[in-house]
Image (cartoon, rainbow, N blue to C red):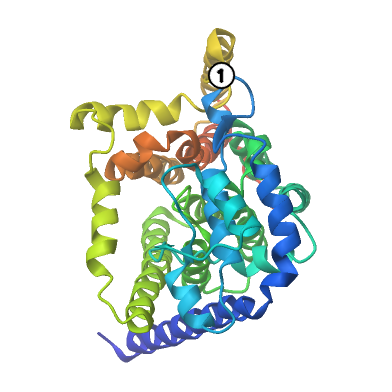
Amino acid sequence: MNKKIINIIIKKLILFFITTGLLCVLLVSTAWIPKEAIRHNSLVSAQYLMQKDVFFDAASGINGSRIDRYADSILLNIAYHYDREYPLRSVMVSAYYFTPSQDENANFLDAVKDDLGVNRQYLRYWHGSILFVRPLLTVLSIRGIYILHAILLILLFSAFLVTALRLRQRAVALAMTLALIFTGIFFVPLSLEYTWNFLVMLAASLAALILASREKPVDFGTFFMITGMITCFLDFLTTETLTLLIPLLIILKVKKTPFKEAWKSSLYRAFCWGFGYAGIWAAKWGLTAIVYRENVIPYVAEHIGERLGGDLTGVSGLTMITRAVTRNIFCLFPLGYGGAGAVAAIVIILAGAYIAYVYHVNDFDRGSILLFALIGIVPFIRFLILHNHSYIHYFFTYRALGSTIFALVLIIACLTGEKGGPGSSPGKRR
């Protein structure tokens, strides 16, 4: 290993530890907000959440519209119980009030109404979104936060669309639009759990689009490491691959790097994202073990085992693996919208195939198509590896297929000679 590589590794490790420390300090600082400052909006939020079941369909009978308020209630419950006297411990342990005799919405309401103490921990995640949620609860209820999230999603998407069109990246603009539509973006702001990864993905995609359009070299390894860290910090294990794959697809499309170099750089960027994601997760467990003064690995290992292959459903292993994929696919819009939706999906597929065949050019970029296809397959690998989790939570994990939709649009764009970028021109048509 040469000196240059060693220096790069050292710099990234230093940045990793600085970022981890900064995120931890910022999250712990929210514990200093007095409980009294968030009590009113916590109570209003709990009453609002009680108006619905912990799981409900925003559109009747549509699995892809199912909203998860179970996780939201737990998150608010944890946020409410941050302790000013023991800020670091309360943040690391992430404890909340629980009783098995009622659902999480009712538990949260009782916790706030009767000022009940904690009796269960949820230490395996950072719950980093509390960094934003707890301060927001001083001025907004959960309903206001949902509305704020919807506004932020619209603003980020609009900024991305305008930037992509200004840079003449029409295929990228279309790919993002269709990826969001097919994954039911209109339901995402109705659950905190769903929103964070889409906010990170859109922000990272906008940054990737701008950076990739510049001639000046960019350290995308650092970019993806930080993106992976933020994803893990905020996420509740929902659609984490979106924040890696869509920005990666955008960079590959804009930069138009030769295949040999592109696949190597893609592996490097994916490794950096994975290091950031897994590294900060491991840091959480290590810090918690130190603060909690207990070995948390058996607890963490148990839950990892459940998501990799545990049996919480009574369904056979092969059936679960198969349906982990099919359940997710059939939540996509319009596939999950009954017979009419299935017909519409077939029409869309045939239209895409028709455009790719009739308007394809002779000199299309086979290397880019191969890379786009490989990246588009990753969500399916994710479903297979985490098949228990993907089978049970298919109604939100299906949105990871947004990167597959994005990749398919870029493949059609390559086949039809859509180049994009300043000074580009379409290839010779067949």
Q: Label 1 sits on what residue type?
A: Gly
Query: Which residue: 40% across, 84% down?
Result: 13
- Image quarter in which the C terminus is found: top right
Query: Which residue: 23% across, 43% down?
Result: 310
- Report whether 122 appears left or right of 218: left
Q: Residues within 10 Å of mark 1 (few under 14, many from 20)?
A: few
Q: Quadrant of residue 299?
A: bottom left
Q: Is residue 191 above or below residue 272?
A: above
Nearest the camera: 391 or 72? 72
Where is residue 178 drawn, in percent x and y?
63, 34
Q: Can residue 153 be seen in this view?
A: no
- Report whether 222 appears left or right of 38: left
Q: Is residue 95 visible?
A: yes
- Report whether 421 appears left or right of 320: right
Q: Quadrant of residue 115?
A: bottom right
Where is residue 225 drawn, in percent x and y?
46, 70
Query: Which residue: 50% across, 27% down?
Result: 331
Query: Which residue: 28% across, 45% down?
Result: 385
Where is residue 127 drawn, in percent x and y?
51, 64
Which residue is identified by label 1? 61
Nearest the camera: 282 or 99? 99
Indicate the secondary structure of the residue bearing disc 1.
loop
Nearest the camera: 279 or 3? 279
Q: In this view, does 172 lie above or below 76?
A: above
Where is residue 30 drawn, in percent x and y?
63, 76
